[in-house]
Image: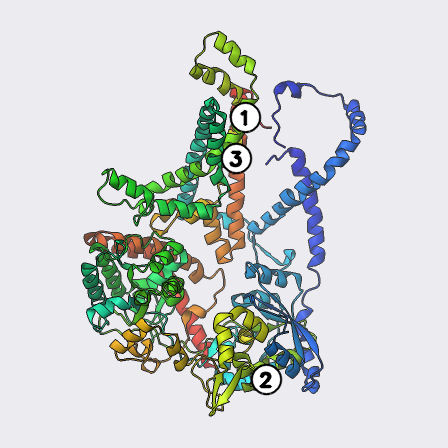
Amino acid sequence: MKTVTSNAENAYKLPKRHAWKVFRNQQYLYYMSIPFVLWVFVFQYLPLWGWTMAFQKYKPGLGFLDQKWVGLEHFSVLFGDEHFYQVLRNTLAMSLMGLIAGFIVPVVFALLLNEVRVQVMKRFVQTVSYLPHFVSWVVAAGIVTKMLSTDGGVVNDILMNLHLIDKPLQFMAEGNLFWGIVTGADIWKETGWSAIIYLAAISGIGPELYEAARVDGASRLQQMWHITLPGIRPTIIVLLIMSIGHLLGTGFEKQFLLGNHLVIDYSEVLDLYALNYGLAMGRYSFGTAINIFNSVISLLLLFAANGIFKRFTNESIM
Amino acid sequence: MKVTKKGTVTTSLLALSVVVALTGCSSNKGSSTTEGTHAEEGSTSGTSLKPITLTYFSEDSSTNWNNMKDEVGKVIAEKTGVTLDAEFAVGDPVQKISLIAATGNYPDLIAAKADVGKLVDAGAILDLTDLIDKHAPNIKKMLGDKLVRTKYSLDDQAIYAIPTWSSVDEKKFKTDGGFELQHRVVKEAGYPEIRTVKDYEKVIQDYIAKHPTDENGNKNIGLSLNADDWHMYQVTNSGFQTTGGPDDGEYYIDQETHQATYHFRRPEEKEYFRWLNHMNDIGLLDPESFVQKTDQFKAKVASGRVLGLADPEWDYGDGQNALKAAGKFDQTYGHYPVTMSKDYKDTNFWPAGFDGGYGISISSKTKDPVRAIQFLDYLASEEGQILVNWGIEGKHYTYENGKRTIIPEVQQRMDKDGAAFQKESGIGLYWNMMVHYGDGIKDSTGNFFTRNYPEMLTATYNEAEKETLKGYGIDHWKDLFPSEEEFQPRAYGAAYTMSLPNDDPAVILGAKMKDITWKRIPQAVMSKPEQFDAIWDAYMADLEKAGVEEMEASYTKHIQDRIKLWSNQ
């Protein structure tokens, strides 16, 4: 699905007539792909039909042709709402923080873990680190709020015992801290899991490279910097481009579960906005308009990121 | 993720073919509205008990439903000839109703609750006015002049649903709301009168000064609130409850002029929130009040450390049950009619009257609407009411000296093995399929229709609760509160039961106001006392800027329309 193609492969082009011949030769492969093409079509493309709702005053129960068409009205309401820009800011801020942290931390973690020479220790750390990934956000958010509680929360207890603070801190009541808490919780939950893919890529690097480096007198750090890191560079870039595409679609579970009314100015994200002002109020059309905006921006970001990386590093996912 | 040029072309081609398919679907409409004429034909077969199966869909789940194989169900089937093939909503019921409306596969009986409008728009349900008039003497008798309250709207005065959720003429016995204090707190203080927020504050303060921690050294908490997500309503409702306003949702409605005001805009309520701010300032308010999640709140209540609450019992009940199970009865709660000053009456028992509201509709495609309405009418008869509430005579209840009582062994099973017993007996299962009398209404034998009556309530009190009630010289918590008779009935019922169109200004602006309020109230309460006024002023300015007056005007119109609809017979 997401293959890395280099320019060299693209350069090889078949003459027109040969294309048909090749198709005939490979026809069984094409037949075999039909179910999957259908699957993608039914579940990924067909739902796009629902986008028409954004241009209607949609009422359930009426047939498609009985709906009233309103043009771009829902979009103008959306862009005219001040609240929307605040929500957009929160979404972008938390996504960017998540993107940067979620990109750097797992790479560093994988690099460090790779240097652990005691196999048992390595396995143990790896397993422990990715376990939180399997915990749902509902539970994870419960753990986070409990840890940060002023009423017997571990974090406050530790800070108090170290005499760093003299009164428990209200972590969850401070808007300024919210983005950080969300990002932190995300890192705790996902670092181990994201690191797996880098560890796999690292194990694919030939040992002879390290041997050669050692012969040349490279230190452990130099080996990491000059061999391991360049070795997993394609993986890093592909994952980075893909997560840029997800920038606006970070979901809302974290914010929904960790947020409260005191920090709402910092916690409300686009998906929550669509939920509260669209679906929950029965404004299906408005909700759809928000979603279209979301998808369009995501696509633009993805193409932009891809273009930039293509130009500077010759790596791309398309 | 990947969208190629070729992909877009294929999609648009395929999209085109979908258009064609959909046009085909929506071609035959409008045939459904005329089918009401069946009613006339059916009237001759009035007393027929020929077995018939009706399909039924309800938005509420019913986990103990047993396909009418239960004892009560068998009797109903025998008396009416009707067997229900029922489906109950799983997950989001709104989606299912939308689907029913969209596909045209209407069940014979549909309980769509607040979403009845979707069915009306699709022409899926019958106007029941004539059917009730001709075939439903019991429903007519029970609703009487309240029948007008079941009308849909001022523009469309049809009756689309038989109101089976709301109780008729209910007199509540049980106190659910008010402010709560642990029994040990009032006991220690010697059962003083708890009438104003100052009284309430004082007993908590005195107790906490003496016992800052519980027996295990954990801190006692003065007052804790649950403001998690929509539970915020429970916090803000105290605003009007302590200042003499009845529960009309987010509005205060002037009983003379019927002008609606967003209730936070009343100066009286500012003083309530100022008091909360003061409670926070002196450390009696749980600092986590606006941060904690519902489960944390319940866990706190269950730990027995929270001395006071201002929350309805259905919300903190789980926590209190844990206390009961642990035998910590003196840490469970009593209810007190706390207001800002003695000039205000607590409005917990201000009757809302019968509000029409949620109910069962009959599909426009049903084969025999008369049998359907007769089925519903049977349940509304005295026989039906007693059957559904009490079960079968001799099997579940007996008359002792003319007093209807549940057989003790049956009562035991109800208490211990409720779910299985309900599945087997069916008692209570059909509660919201019938128009029903509320608690405190007596039948022709002089017994109560429902199984909730004062003696039953007494039986649920634990020792500590009885001691406190005795300390105050009362039988029930209700005796502390102003009674129903002290209030004028509201001409519009309870405002919050009104369902408004999704795109109404009152709805859209209402959502904005809610966001502002839910942000500002916690901010105001948690601020330093000297900042309170500034924050409150900014809050009021925010509301005005967001169009609160337009919203109030729109809501006022809805209220006045409802009064007009309900007063024209």
- Real-space CA distance between mark 1 and mark 2, rounded to the nearest whole angstrom: 73 Å
Q: Residue B521: percent from the left, percent from the top?
A: 31, 56
The numbered mark at residue A235 is: 1
- Compared to residue A233, the image places residue B428 above or below, namely below
* Residue at x 70% of width, y 77% of height: B52
Mark seen at residue A165: none
Q: Quadrant of residue A144?
A: top left
For label 3, count other residues whose C-alpha is less than 10 Å away and answer few (under 14), some (14-19) or many (20+): many
Question: How did the renderer colour the structure?
Answer: rainbow
Left or right placement of residue B361 versus residue B499 in this view? right
Which residue type carries mark 1? Thr
Disc 2 residue type (three-letter): Ala
Q: Label 2: which residue?
A: B136
- In the rendered image, residue B120, in percent from the top left (x then y), is placed at 58, 68
Q: Secondary structure at mark 2?
A: loop
Host chain of mark 2: B
Q: What residue does disc 3 label?
A: A245
Chain bearing tag 1 is: A
Q: Decide which of tag 3 and tag 1 comes sooner along the chain.
A: 1
Q: Residues within 10 Å of mark 1 (few under 14, many from 20)?
A: some
Residue at (48% x, 84% y) in the render: B405
